[in-house]
């Protein structure tokens, strides 16, 4: 990705409302910005409305087309807490981590952080989530206050969505690393005569391959972060690469210490 192309994506993303609702057909505002930079129509953002289309048209030079779906006013989700069964499905669906709760415990929405994306509504098995006009939008008394609210929502929505994506990526990496550690431990136990589902040497080879794949993934993530000039992503990828490399060395050592007969 060239620097100019990346700059265009950043500029497009800065104009989007950061509700992360997916109504454009993409899993968030940043992916839609990338699609627009590749030539996708600019009229697929209901929360952005006609104003966002006009700004995107001015930036990209694309024609200002009517919205594909009706414009959407700023909303907030409200959980009818007495009816909540604590299933956590809404928590898992929220793209900005704006819902508090735990399994089999009542959930509640942090209104100030809710982008009104509606993604929590469909997964709710007891239909106890309502969408209402956002209280901060309703409290605005003039155009300047409304614009200030939209800017604040976009800023917070982008930051919280990025934090969530990083958290989920970190958890997925930790799961992969733990699976690799289990393979290494199984191989080590098997070399001492312990039972296992596969021959010990095969397990050790599998552990090495899994660690090699983790190192390759970390290299790719680091190179991608460098191309985007994303310092935080570079830092996370470097840490992941260090852990994956240590696992690979451990797996190779286990394999070398127990050569095939």
Image (cartoon, rainbow, N blue to C red):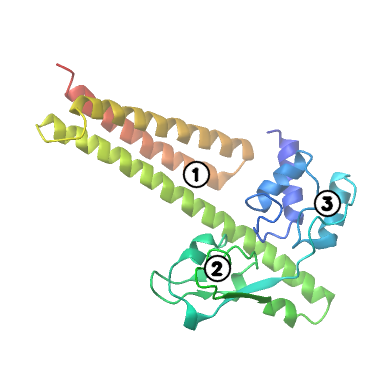
Judged from the image, the secondary structure of the residue bearing numbered disc 1 is: helix
Which badge, 2 or 1, comes first in the chain's sequence?
2
Residue reaching furthest front?
A: 126
Label 1 with label 3: CB-CB less than 8 Å: no
Which residue position holds label 1?
A: 235
The answer to whether residue 158 is above or below residue 242 is: below
Count residues near mark 3 (Cα–Cα under 10 Å), then give few for <14, some for 14-19, many for 20+: many
Judged from the image, the secondary structure of the residue bearing numbered disc 3 is: helix
Count residues near mark 1 (Cα–Cα under 10 Å), then give few for <14, some for 14-19, many for 20+: few
Q: How far apart are marks 2 and 1 (CA)?
A: 26 Å
The answer to whether residue 133 is above or below residue 150 is: below
Which badge, 3 or 2, comes first in the chain's sequence?
3
Quadrant assignment for the C terminus? top left
Count residues near mark 2 (Cα–Cα under 10 Å), then give few for <14, some for 14-19, many for 20+: many
Which residue position holds label 2?
A: 98
Mark number displayed over residue 100: none
Q: Residue at horizontal 46%, vertical 36%?
A: 218
Quadrant assignment for the N terminus? top right
Residue 55 lies left or right of residue 12; in this view the side is right
Which residue position holds label 3?
A: 56
Which image quadrant for residue 35? top right
Q: How far apart are marks 1 and 3 (CA)?
A: 32 Å
Residue 237 horizontal/vertical position (percent): 48, 41
């Amino acid at each position: 990705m060239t620097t100019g192309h990346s700059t265009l994506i950043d500029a497009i993303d800065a104009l989007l409302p950061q509700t992360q609702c997916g109504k454009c057909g993409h899993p968030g505002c940043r992916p839609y910005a990338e699609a627009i930079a590749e030539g996708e129509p600019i009229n697929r953002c209901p929360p952005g409305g006609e104003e966002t289309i006009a700004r995107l048209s001015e930036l990209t030079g694309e024609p200002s087309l009517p919205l594909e779906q009706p414009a959407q006013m700023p909303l907030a989700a409200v959980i009818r807490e007495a009816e909540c069964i604590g299933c956590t499905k809404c928590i898992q669906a929220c793209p900005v981590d704006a819902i508090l709760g735990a399994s089999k415990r009542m959930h509640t929405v942090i209104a100030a952080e809710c982008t009104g994306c509606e993604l929590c509504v469909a997964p709710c098995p007891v239909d106890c989530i309502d969408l209402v006009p956002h209280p901060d939008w309703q409290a605005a008394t003039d155009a300047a206050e409304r614009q200030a609210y939209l800017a604040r929502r976009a800023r917070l929505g982008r930051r919280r969505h990025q934090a969530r994506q990083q958290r989920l990526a970190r958890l997925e990496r930790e799961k992969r690393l733990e699976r690799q550690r289990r393979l290494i431990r199984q191989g080590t136990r098997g070399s001492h005569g312990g039972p296992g589902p596969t021959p010990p040497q095969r397990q050790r080879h599998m552990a090495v391959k899994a660690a090699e794949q983790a190192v390759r993934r970390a290299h790719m993530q680091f190179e991608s972060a460098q191309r985007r000039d994303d310092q935080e992503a570079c830092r996370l990828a470097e840490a992941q690469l260090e852990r994956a490399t240590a696992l690979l060395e451990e797996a190779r050592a286990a394999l070398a210490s127990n050569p095939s007969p």
